[in-house]
Each structure stands twice: as C-alpha cells, then as structure tokens.
Image (tube, rainbow, N blue to C red):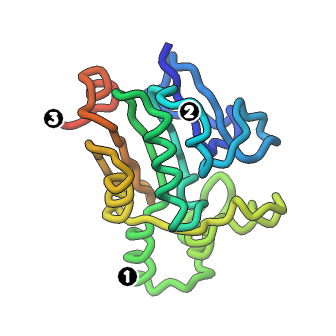
Amino acid sequence: MRKVLNVGGNSKAIAIPDCYDGWEHILLDIDPRGNPDVVCDARELGNLPAASYDSIYCSHNLEHYYHHDVARVLSGFIHLLKDDGFALIRVPDMGWLMRTVAQDNLDIEDILYHSPAGPIAVRDMIYGLGTQIERSGVDFFAHKTGFTQKSLHMALQKAGFSHIFVAMGNREIFSFSFKNKPSDYAAKLLGLPDH
C-alpha cells in the first residue's frame, strides 16, 4: 500500500485530496492535540527514516515557517520521499493578494472573502487567521513567510526537486513536485501535462 505523509495537517478529520484514496494516511504535526501519528517539527524531518513515503502532502503549512527555514523543511521532504515519490504542496497565493489589494484599494483590515472559519481579512492572509491564533494560544498558527508562484517554484527547485508543476486557483498556489521524472502512474493519478 502506498503511504502519504500529511505534514502539518492538524487532524485526520480534515480531508485530504481524493488522489490519496486507498493510500495509508500518516499524519505528522507539531501539536499533539490533533492526535498525529508522528509528533514532529517539520524542520526536523531529516531525523526520520529516509525514503519512507510515496508522497508528502503539505496543505497551508509551509507558510508557517520563517523564510530561512523553508529550505530545511523542503529538504526534509526530499529526504523522506521514495525515488518515484512526489510532494503535493498548497500555500496561500501572495501574488493574488498583492494584485487584489492594489486593484481594489484594500486596507489590511478589509475582508477578502468568507470561509467556513469566518471572514478572512487581508491581515489574516498575510499573518495567519487571527481568531485561530488567539483561540489556540500558540504562535505556530501564525504565518511567517509567503509565496508567489515564482518564489515557490524557486524554493522547490533549490531544494532538489527536478520536475515541478505549479498552478494557481482559489487564492492558493499548489504544486506537484518530484525528485525524478514522474512515473506514468503519478502522471495519470495527478492529471499532469505531458512530462
């Protein structure tokens, strides 16, 4: 059975993408309150056994590390992935945010959109959801860096991913990043363009 490591996923009650249907879902998180399978800071992934996972799923977590720590987290992904493995990463789209703020003349307190968690202000997209940070009492929910399509691609490339597919939509950037050329299985599973 293929294994996916969900890095920073908070809880298994939060759904992961359908492409992982039938896979073994291993949850890794720094916060033990969500009952993760592995309690670990993602900056320390290099301490876990190498080449253990077919995929890394990291949704809205990479922005919670300082810019200088992102390379360490991504090198941990490389360390944990099998040779034919891939990372599926989702982050807020700061390029979209900058364009929207400028185009609509928004203030940092203005509401961008409404989510199931409540209204999301410009400030929340930059610094993390203020109500969640306040309610939790822990600062690891704060955003410490941000990404545009270009900067995420560059960070992934610098970390050692050789084949990177990056797209944007719904105020986020998502990427499928491979250590090596994607297998036919992965290309079909993820609907990748000709590789």
Q: Which mark is residue 103?
A: 1
Residue shown at 44% from the left, 60% from the top: 171
Q: Is residue 89 above or below residue 36?
A: below
Of the residues tagged 2 and 1, which is closer to the observer?
Answer: 2
Which residue lies at the image location 59% right of the left edge and 61% below the top edge? 65
Type of residue at label 1? Gln
Alpha carbons under labels 2 and 1: distance apart: 38 Å
Give the amino acid type for the residue marked by disc 2 in the picture: Leu
Which image quadrant is residue 111 in?
Answer: bottom right
Q: Crowding at label 3, few (<14), some or many (≥20) Cα neighbours within 10 Å? A: few
**Under tag 1, what secondary structure?**
helix
- Look at the numbered discs 1 and 3 and tell me whether their residues touch, using CB distance below 8 Å: no
Estimate the x, y position of residue 156 in percent, counting from the top left.
37, 53
Question: Disc 3 or 2, which lies upstream in sequence?
Answer: 2
Q: Residue furthest left?
A: 194
Q: Secondary structure at mark 2?
A: strand
Q: Which residue is mark 2?
A: 5
